[in-house]
Image: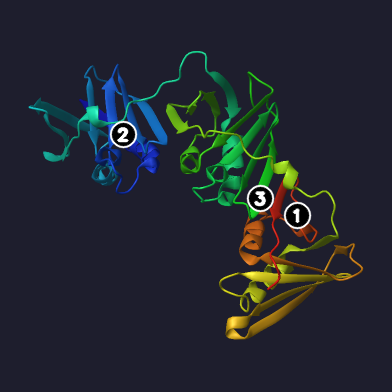
Amino acid sequence: MIIKRELFLKAIEKVNVVIMRNPTLPVLEMILVDIKDNTCSVTATNLETTINYSFDIDTDDKHLFCVSPKDLTNFLSQLDSDFIETTITKSKVDDIYKGTILFEYGLGSNIEFPLGDAEDFPEQLTVPDGSDSFIIDGKVLKDAIFASKSYTGSDPLRPIMTNINITVTANAIRSIATDANILHTIVLESENRLITKSDHLEFMIVNTAIASLLKLPISETEVSITDKNIFYKTEGMTIITTLTEGKYFKWKQVIPTEFQCEITFNKAAFAKGIKIASITSSSSSHQLVFKVKGKELSIVSNDVDYAKKGAFKMPLVESNVTEEFTVALNSKYLTQLLISTPDVENLQFKMNTMKANIMGSIEKQLILIMPMAIL
């Protein structure tokens, strides 16, 4: 049997992103290879997310086995040969499985790897008939996931907040993520219709699937939703993720509608002020105090433990504040905000003493940061 090196290596690299280190089940460190009907299918799973990638192969052979991808990837990436002669041997005696995959290349060179029993690999899921499905622009979906991925929480006691919530309408997609301290939402629009079988859909992407979905090709993606899973299928690649039970919280209720302070300022000057003020801020609380009066912003920091303090002052482009307004914010979340708005010259902050609603001047993007008690 001849295997094309480039395609086999590409398949392994596509699915390898979900493989865990030191899993409870040793077989989860392996990939499942299924060769039949002139197709080679490679699958990996961590039980929450499964990735399958298939490519054409010119053979009438049928094989189903598990193999460790680590050494196999290192070997295939070092080869110059485009095609590799491959021999697979398997046997099972008294419930003891033995198998090897032998690659022959060059002038009589060869290398051999042990195989695992495919029966130990978790059962493969398929899309049931009658499942809700729709077609979505893969690029827009990836952009929405990428924009919100760094804002998800990590608290296992609040699993909903470890997810990204996705809402899809005919020509726009909204992603929402929060860890209860900072909330991010962005709306991305498309010239083409995003979904074909419905006008509105909402679902959650589990945190463990985010890295996998960012591997999706930039093309039309068929999404199917069942009671327990979401299937993403495009260009020979299928990603299956578990569906989180419950509904995403009503995030619009936490967005304030009235503000005591609205200011616009130069982003570069603000970023410099955050960096300088953070030098004398507490390393545990990361607290920075913002004082606005007229068209001047002061960023004050104070580390009581080490007797450090400082104040950075900068002019504002616009301000509606006449009397002094003061609020404390975490510098880590402000840094996230600056990263999320890379090509913006000016930023707009809308704030009150209960919530600090911070909206970048990029259209359709909003970041909400909860204020801190002033220490």
Rendering quarter of residue 87: top left
Q: Position of residue 234 (x, y in %)?
A: 49, 27
Mark 1, residues whose alpha carbon is within 10 Å: few (<14), some, or many (≥20)?
Answer: many
| Mark-to-mark CA distance, 2 and 1 | 49 Å
Q: Which residue is nearer to you in this view: 357 or 146? A: 357
**CB under 8 Å between discs 1 and 3:** no
125 vs 78: above or below: above
Q: Which residue is nearer to you in this view: 327 or 83? A: 327
Give the labeled residue for mark 1.
357
SS at mark 2?
Answer: helix
SS at mark 1?
Answer: strand
Q: Quadrant of the N terminus?
A: top left
Q: Quadrant of the C terminus?
A: bottom right
Q: Position of residue 274 (x, y in %)?
A: 67, 70
- Residue lying at the far bottom in this picture: please name it: 307
| Mark-to-mark CA distance, 2 and 3 | 41 Å
175 to the left or right of 315: left
104 vs 270: above or below: above
Mark 3, residues whose alpha carbon is within 10 Å: few (<14), some, or many (≥20)?
Answer: many
**CB under 8 Å between discs 2 and 1:** no
Give the labeled residue for mark 3.
183
Q: Is residue 364 visible?
A: no
SS at mark 3?
Answer: strand
Residue beneath the point at 80% across and 59% down: 352
Residue beneath the point at 31% across and 34% down: 8
- Residue lying at the far front in this picture: please name it: 157
Which comes before the other along the chain, label 2 or label 1? 2
Type of residue at label 1?
Asn
- Residue lying at the far right in this picture: please name it: 322
Give the labeled residue for mark 2.
8
